[in-house]
Image (cartoon, rainbow, N blue to C red):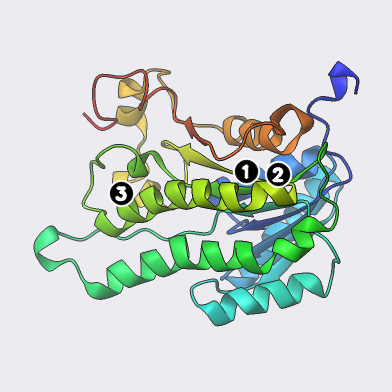
Amino acid sequence: MKIEDLFKIKGKVALVTGGSRGIGEMIAAGFLANGVKVYISARKEDQLNQKAEELSEKFGGECIPIHNDLGTLDGVEELVAKYSSFEESLDFLVNNAGAAWGEPFESFSEGGWDKVMDLNVKSMFFLSRNLTNLLKKNASLDDPSRIINIGSIEGIQVPPFETYSYAASKAAVHHLTRALARKLVSENITVNAIAPGPFPSMMLGPAVNHDYSFIEKTNPRKRIGSPEDIAGLVIYLCSRAGAYTVGDTITCDGGIVNASSSNWTD
């Protein structure tokens, strides 16, 4: 391989769950800009279809929407069936769909716990398992298929908000990533996780009234994340450059976890 082709992913096929907005949209855009055929799934159909059309036009590629709710096992099976009706194989699975829930400790509800755990952990496991056969199709020793799980720095350090189920779910995602990596590496499927810090999104935005200025001031890099930050990391993991990285959880947070002496909202 030529060294200039290390990050080439053109011609591959990806599925990005929760791909119509936020970090999922950023990842889908990065794939499309680099010649990947992308399927995005989301729960809100109108928004999903609009985003798929917008991304296809912007990058001149194929962005195909799959309307789906991954909050249940029926939803997982439905997504696998719908995707399989389009494609016989899959190169990259990005498990990005997720939910957050904030509530005071004293009144934290069972519903807020179960909703987050079901989508963030249970559905991630079963979707990965049920797509394994498709991921095996084109996988090889030199060019494995990839599963990338989107975790969070809240699964690494104590979160600043009362998001108990979310933090616990993301810690579970990181450990599940290691367990899946051990199981699937012999099948030429690598599994890794990314733990993002603050990015502009509908998950973080409402918690800070969409004012990120104080987060920027305390971040070692003095800014929040950009689409290039998360897309670049995903492209690395999916390219030849990242083919030897297995079972890792990589922070993408501007140094909050590893280069700061304070919490990101201090």
Q: Is residue 147 left or right of residue 210?
A: right
Cα separation, mark 1 vs mark 2, equals 5 Å
Tell me the quarter of the picture where residue 129 sits: bottom right
On residue 130, the disc is none
Badge 3 density bin: few <14, some 14–19, many ≥20, Cα 10 Å:
few
Q: Position of residue 227 (x, y in %)?
A: 60, 35
Q: Residue at x 25, y 29 (%)?
A: 263
Residue extending farthest front: 186
**Crowd band around label 1 with a 10 angstrom C-alpha radius: few (<14), some (14–19), many (20+):** some
| Residue pictured at 69% horizontal, 31% vertical | 242
Q: Are marks 1 and 2 in contact (CB under 8 Å)?
A: yes
* Circles 3, 1 touching at the beta carbon (< 8 Å): no
Comes first in the chain, label 3 or label 2: 2
Question: Residue 212's x, y, as percent?
Answer: 37, 34
Residue 141, percent from left and from top: 81, 40
Q: As shown in the figure, which amino acid type bears the numbered disc 2?
A: Ala
- Residue 207 shows which numbered tag? 3
Quadrant of residue 59 within the rendered picture: top right
Identify the residue under disc 1. 26
| Residue situated in front as seen by the camera: 42 or 251 | 251
Q: Secondary structure at mark 2?
A: helix
Evaluate if marks 3 and 2 touch, with contact meaning CB atoms under 8 Å apart.
no
Q: Residue at x 77, y 43 (%)?
A: 144
Q: State the image quarter where residue 27 is shown.
A: top right
Which amino acid type corresponds to the residue marked 3 in the rendered image?
Ala
- According to the picture, the residue beneath numbered tag 2 turns out to be 29
Q: CA distance from mark 3 to mark 1?
A: 20 Å
